[in-house]
Amino acid sequence: MIEGLVNVSDFERAAEEKLDAGVAGYFFGGAGDELTLRENVSAWGHWRLRPRMLAGLSEWRTETELLGGEIALPVLVAPVAYQGLVDPEGEAAMARAAASAGTVMCLSTLATMRPRPVAEAAPGGRRWFQLYCFQDEGVTRALVEEACECGYEAIVVTVDAPRGGNRERDRRTGFKIPAELGVPNVEAAVGSGRAITIEETFELMEPALTWSYLEDLASDCRVPVLVKGVLTAEDATLAVEHGAAGVVVSNHGGRQLDRCLATADALPEVVDAVEGRGAVLVDGGIRRGVDVAIALALGADAVLVGRPALWGLAVGGEAGAHRVLDLLREELHLTLALCGCASPAELGRAHVQRAPAASLYSA
Ligand SMILES: Cc1cc2nc3c(=O)[nH]c(=O)nc-3n(C[C@H](O)[C@H](O)[C@H](O)COP(=O)(O)O)c2cc1C
């Protein structure tokens, strides 16, 4: 079945056909009018590549360095909650797909498995852990400890969700996380046994985080801490000044503040503000290898994909998620070749320019 799917959009359509309305609404949807959800995708199309010719290359590589280690492609799997809703093996299958694709999986706090069994499912794989800070500090601390103990190489603290966004698709379908699914980190905070809404889940988290909280977390933690959900130069500067090893330019895939900046539009100012003092990653709307190349040319060290990997998992389990990552790798490989670059590290600002104004809204 997955053999006939030749790009990420094909996986998107196949996933939409397969999932029931409530689950599809949760995974596909965004906040409010979903303008940011759509703009995350279209904003990558507002840049054009400036390819260079006669570079004398016959080999190209997609491997890249990130936080001191090498990955096979600069595309990571973003933290996406409740993967057990679309595949019986859930996060374990996603971890194996990321490992066999040679990249990092970032596990969500709202996963349907604890950090340890996910690590055990893909022992050779590389993993980061995404942290939502619970009001119950003991729950937060236990999670960070478990992740560090079982080889998660970074903590990615999500800062764009002091409350859950206005997800109208979920309100329309009355979507709840089924009680039988099991979300162990949430159960640690509230006990198990009943279906809860996404809004109720966010109410368990500490809304009043501060930069000094981040600084304490980063100094207590034995692995690097990245801040996910930064959209401005101001916050990027504060993040690196308060001990972050890097930032993820993200608007939560358009699921939190509708009408905030598309991530492709926020990325350049964040790269300029960080000035090489930390890693800069970006997610939101990456659907093509060309999008990855544009993000790298604008100065990102790597990108993450949320929905694309999830669509792969929903359509074809581990093999489906692996295929999505492989398609992005193949497309990036071709883009590098056609741009005259031997590797991702060779892409720079000279390889991109804004699209002519007339073409911005026509494509
Ligand atoms: C269904 C779904 C669940 C998500 N759950 C989380 C989460 O638990 N923690 C988090 O930091 N981000 C979460 N995100 C945001 C993603 O990590 C990422 O920022 C976003 O999906 C990127 O946009 P993309 O889906 O267009 O690639 C979620 C996104 C989706 C679509």
Image: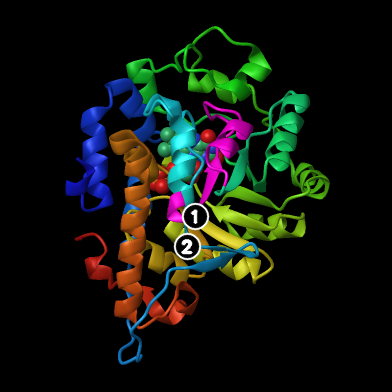
Question: On the image, numbered disc 1 is attached to which residue?
Answer: 103
Q: Where residue 153 sits in the image (x, y, percent)?
A: 66, 50
The reply to whether callout 1 and callout 2 are in contact (CB within 8 Å) is: yes
Residue range in magenta is 100-123
Q: Amino acid at mark 2?
A: Ala
Picture coordinates of residue 59, whole percent (x, y): 36, 80
Q: Which mark is residue 72?
A: 2
Q: Answer with the quarter of the image where residue 297 lies.
A: bottom left
> Label 1 crowding class (10 Å Cα cut-off): few <14, some 14-19, many 20+?
many
Queried whether the magenta region covers residue 108, the answer comes back as: yes
Looking at marks 1 and 2 on the same chain, the residue that comes earlier in the sequence is marked by: 2
What residue is at 33 percent from the left and 17 percent from the top? 173
Residue 2 on the magenta span:
no
Instruction: Residue type at mark 1: give it.
Output: Thr
In percent of width and height, residue 296 lies at 46, 68
Q: Give how far across and how far down residue 227 sits, in percent.
A: 64, 49
Tell me if the residue at label 2 has its CB under 8 Å from ligand 1.
Answer: no
In which quadrant will I find the C terminus?
Answer: bottom left
